[in-house]
Amino acid sequence: DADVTQTPRNRITKTGKRIMLECSQTKGHDRMYWYRQDPGLGLRLIYYSFDVKDINKGEISDGYSVSRQAQAKFSLSLESAIPNQTALYFCATSPGQAYTYEQYFGPGTRLTVT
Amino acid sequence: GESVGLHLPTLSVQEGDNSIINCAYSNSASDYFIWYKQESGKGPQFIIDIRSNMDKRQGQRVTVLLNKTVKHLSLQIAATQPGDSAVYFCAENNDSYDKVIFGPGTSLSVIP
């Protein structure tokens, strides 16, 4: 079974709709992240969480919100989807140790906003 | 400004040859660098990392070189195989938290 799972894997929605992307992990990591990937731009950080009570904005948080329901679950919401939020979204986790920053990524959610 | 970028967006290599993927970074305070591999339809996967107190690190068929003087990072893949075809990202950590900044990626194609 995959250590980091994302649901749904693909979603097409209309402008103005509310969308939630979910991420679950079985790695036991405290730290979780949401990224979006656009062609030619690499991965950009949307939000990150170091534990259940800690939520932080990344470089492109406008238009998004998150919820850390438990250590293993971190969801990303688009309150009112717009076409330029069409992208590939990745959830990632990492250990809390200061000496390692390796991140473990889920398989991604492809979101299309029409 | 802070940025991590790659010199070439695409790279084609003959099967069996060595591949070299380059990366430049702009923040001299960055102290940790990572290479990720992303295959089609999958999330990025860790390949190898290196800290700023090292200039070379080797893994299985991969070597990462760090030149802090010119702020340059490279990933060398020995005896490139078709399974190495993917997009490769370099990433840097440049503050006290484990956030990383990713470059735009280089697409490696292996010619059989």
Image: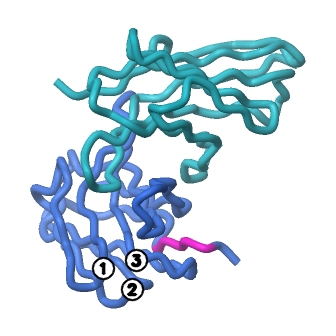
Chain colours: A blue, B cyan
Pick whichever of labels 1 and 3 is earlier in the sequence: 3
Q: To which residue does mark 3 refer? A: A30
Rendered view: A77 above or below B102: below
The image quadrant of residue B58 is top right
Q: CA distance from mark 3 to mark 2?
A: 6 Å
Q: For the residue carrying disc 1, how many other residues have a C-alpha within 10 Å: few (<14), some (14-19), or many (20+)? A: some
Q: Amino acid at mark 1?
A: Asp
Q: Position of residue A44 (x, y in %)?
A: 30, 45
For the N terminus of chain A, the image quarter is bottom right
Q: Amino acid at mark 2?
A: Gln
Write the start and end of the magenta stretch as one range: A3-7
Q: Is residue A55 visible in the rendered structure shown here?
A: yes
Pick whichever of labels 1 and 2 is earlier in the sequence: 1
Q: Position of residue B3 (x, y in %)?
A: 27, 27
Pick whichever of labels 3 and 2 is earlier in the sequence: 3
Q: To which residue does mark 2 refer? A: A71
The image quadrant of residue A76 is bottom left
Q: To which residue does mark 1 refer? A: A51
Q: CA distance from mark 1 to mark 2?
A: 7 Å
Rendered view: A24 above or below A81: below
Confirm or deny contact between disc 1 and disc 2 (CB under 8 A): yes
Q: For the residue carrying disc 3, how many other residues have a C-alpha within 10 Å: few (<14), some (14-19), or many (20+)? A: some
Taking the spot 37% from the left edge, 43% from the top edge, the residue there is A43
Q: Secondary structure at mark 1?
A: strand
Confirm or deny contact between disc 3 and disc 2 (CB under 8 A): yes
Q: Amino acid at mark 3?
A: Asp
Q: For the residue carrying disc 2, how many other residues have a C-alpha within 10 Å: few (<14), some (14-19), or many (20+)? A: many
Q: Relative to the observer, which residue lies in front, B104 or A20? A: B104
Q: Chain of mark 3?
A: A
